[in-house]
Image (tube, rainbow, N blue to C red):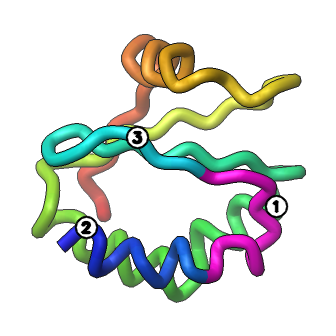
Amino acid sequence: MLIRYSGPIFGNIRSHKCLSFSTSGLWLNHYTMTVWNNEEDMKEFVFSKEHKAAMAKTKEMASGVKFYQAEMNKKPTWREAKRLIKENCQRSNNF
């Protein structure tokens, strides 16, 4: 189900000015990391039709979503990113 709804997002994420995206994890813990030039570009993607449609299905796939947003000088490693999520995550059940 995750692949079904994430496919359209990954298919056109670069048209939303994403500099880099990657995923990690399987099954119960899935992570997505994106890199943007600015917050405006990121929000344009977050509120895009494709992303909103996928997020509407989140309740069917997960008990909740955690996200972490930060300004950094370089892209973190997955190890660092997962540590930051664990220490600073915001949880949303609103999707």
Sequence order check: which comes first, mark 1 or mark 3? 3
Sequence order check: which comes first, mark 1 or mark 2? 2
Amino acid type of the residue that numbered disc 3 sits on in the rendered structure: Ser
Mark 2 neighbour class, 10 Å CA radius: few under 14, some 14 to 19, many 20 or more = some
Amino acid type of the residue that numbered disc 1 sits on in the rendered structure: Glu
Q: In the rendering, at what x and y percent does residue 64 appear?
A: 21, 47
Q: Could you say which quadrant of the image residue 94 lies in?
A: bottom left
Nearest to the observer: residue 65 or residue 94: 65
Q: Is residue 77 left or right of residue 66?
A: right
Which residue is depicted at the point 79% across and 51% down? 36
Q: Nearer the viewer, mark 1 or mark 3?
A: 3
Q: Which residues are magenta?
A: 12-21
Label 3 sits on a secondary structure element that is: strand
Q: Could you say which quadrant of the image residue 77 lies in?
A: top right
Q: In the rendering, at what x and y percent does residue 89 appear?
A: 42, 26
**Measured along the vertical axis of the image, is residue 2 above or below residue 19?**
below
Amino acid type of the residue that numbered disc 2 sits on in the rendered structure: Leu
Q: Nearer the viewer, mark 3 or mark 2?
A: 3
Which residue is depicted at the point 38% across and 17% down? 86
State which quarter of the image contains the N terminus. Answer: bottom left
Q: In the rendering, at what x and y percent does residue 68 appear?
A: 53, 34
Q: CA distance from mark 3 to mark 2?
A: 13 Å
> Which labelled disc corresponds to residue 40?
1
Q: Is residue 29 left or right of residue 50?
A: left
Sequence order check: which comes first, mark 3 or mark 2? 2
Is 78 a magenta residue? Answer: no
Q: Circle 2 is placed at which residue position?
A: 2
Q: Circle 3 is placed at which residue position?
A: 24
Q: Is residue 90 left or right of residue 80?
A: left
Numbered disc total: 3
Q: CA distance from mark 1 to mark 3?
A: 25 Å
Label 2 sits on a secondary structure element that is: helix
